[in-house]
Image (spheres, grey):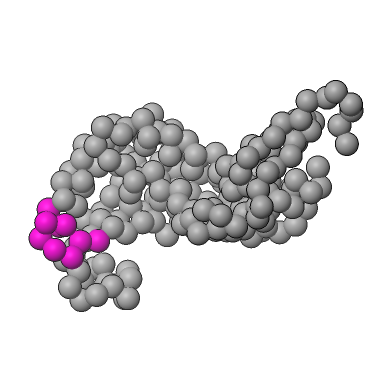
Amino acid sequence: MPAKGARMDVIVGGGVVGLSVAWRLARSGRPVTVVDPAPGRGASYAAAGMLAPVSEVAYTEEPLLRLGAASLRRWPSFAAELTADAGLDTGLGTGFMEPDALTKPGGGFSGALGFRGAGGEAARLGLDLRTDGTLDVAFGADDLAALNDLAAFMDKLGLRVERLTGRECRRLEPMLAPSVRGGLLAPGDAWVDPRRVTAALLAALERL
């Protein structure tokens, strides 16, 4: 219990963001409480957990690309600290990414993104950052034209993407309909299980 008259930080919302803020505050020794009828069971429970700055880039949103790349770059240390505080095998992932996995050699954004892999330490942790990449697909002529325009924009930014035929898309994802016309693969994108993230955050908070 905090001392009488001491301030307590109140976090409204017990999803990934709210619990992460509460965890960081608690780690710094500040009293904190989370207000949520079912922590970890809201939007975060159904989220895709994407750390996918390349496939989510859009025109005029280069600042968001930098932010997304920074989030992906910081994931290994975040997951390692969270696993230690939770005191259990969270099944999260520091994963392993090749240096500059998001950009082509000499790409315009390579220096700005500054992504580097987690290295061997990641493999020693019981975690699992999925680095399968992201596949965007097109089924109609308009979709394919829009996807090709987006690919040209990504190329201009120096991002690492691969144009695929419909057959190549189905080879990667056999459950796609035969009508798929083509696709765009961002091999440096990643994702994590948000349910494991919230479970680990709750476990860490209980121990602090």
Q: Is residue 191 visible?
A: no
Which residue, as the protein is rendered here, is positioned at the far left?
A: 141
Asked whether, in this view, residue 37 is left or right of residue 28, the answer is left
The residue drawn where x is 75% and y is 45% is 205
Magenta stretch: residue 1 in it? no
Residue 177: where, in percent of width, then height? 24, 75
Which residue, as the protein is rendered here, is positioned at the far top?
A: 5
Q: Which residues lie in the magenta part?
A: 137-145
The residue drawn where x is 33% and y is 71% is 173
The residue drawn where x is 57% and y is 42% is 17
Residue 148: where, in percent of width, then height? 16, 51
> Split into 4 quadrants, where in the image is the C terminus?
top right
Q: Is residue 15 visible?
A: yes
Vertical comparison of 176 with 207: above or below: below
Residue 95: where, in percent of width, then height? 55, 53
Vertical comparison of 153 with 177: above or below: above
Magenta stretch: residue 138 in it? yes
Residue 74: where, in percent of width, then height? 55, 39
Asked whether, in this view, residue 141 is left or right of residue 168, the answer is left
Vertical comparison of 73 with 112: above or below: below
> Split into 4 quadrants, where in the image is the N terminus?
top right
The residue drawn where x is 46% and y is 57% is 48
**Quarter of the image holding residue 184?**
bottom left
Q: Please name whichever residue, 119 or 64, is drawn nearer the observer in this view of the structure.
A: 64
**Quarter of the image holding residue 171?**
bottom left
**Quarter of the image holding residue 154?**
top left
